[in-house]
Image (tube, rainbow, N blue to C red):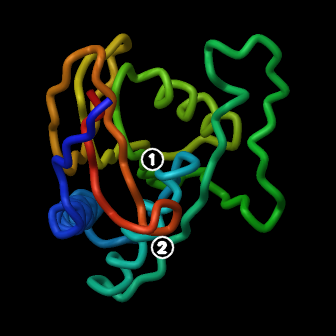
Amino acid sequence: MTNKEVLDNASLQRALTRITYEIIERNKGGQDLVLVGIKTRGEFLAHRIANRLEQLEGVKIPVMAIDITNFRDDVLNHDDSLGLNDEEKTNIADKNIVLIDDVLFTGRTIRAALDALIHIGRPNTIALAVLVDRGHRELPIRADFVGKNIPTAQNEKIKVLVQEIDGRDAVEIVH
């Protein structure tokens, strides 16, 4: 397998900044906004976007991370657990949610995340932000905020590297 870097650190940072500005414009600041990152890499991206929002708007935005494993359609035994302790739970009722993930592919992870969010409460709106949209949807799901569209072949994979886990920021196509 070979890896081809398609976003370097600077490009990834610009993409996150662009997403942040689009979130600000769509939400007229940050009032009633909650960022929800899909574990694992979406969680780190959500925190980065929240930090940028705070720098730009002077508002601290709540960030929550969800584990959608038990809401996936390929898991037979659901226990409806999000793996959240009380400190991690944020009241999402009547809030404007921005669901954040690293890569949008088939849409199945996002569908599971939507089920998980509705399990927690009834938000006012849910928007989707992804660092990379690679196409090949199996469900009618689209992102509201996209850092970069990267068309791929079905057999290729997108690998998002984040400093917090991988020691550097980049996006690679794995052939």
- Name the residue beneath numbered marker 1: 99
Res. 24 image quadrant: bottom left
In the image, 44 versus 94, the foreground residue is: 44
Count neighbours of disc 2 (C-alpha within 10 A) and say few if under 14, some if 14 to 19, many if 20 or more. many
Percent from the top left, x then y, of residue 112? 57, 27
| Foreground pick, 94 / 132 | 132
Q: Secondary structure at mark 2?
A: loop
Q: Which residue is mark 2?
A: 61
Front one among 107 and 159: 159
Q: Residues within 10 Å of mark 1 (few under 14, many from 20)?
A: many
Looking at the image, can residue 34 be seen?
no
**Residue 121, x across and y down, in percent:** 66, 43
Q: Residue at x 36, y 11 (%)?
A: 138
Question: Is 102 situated left or right of 37 in this image?
Answer: left
Instruction: Please tell me which residue lies in front, 17 or 165.
Output: 165
* Side of 35 relative to 139 (left or right): right
Three-letter residue code for mark 2:
Ile
**From what the image shows, is residue 174 above or below residue 147?**
above
Where, quadrant-wise, is the N terminus in this rendering?
A: top left
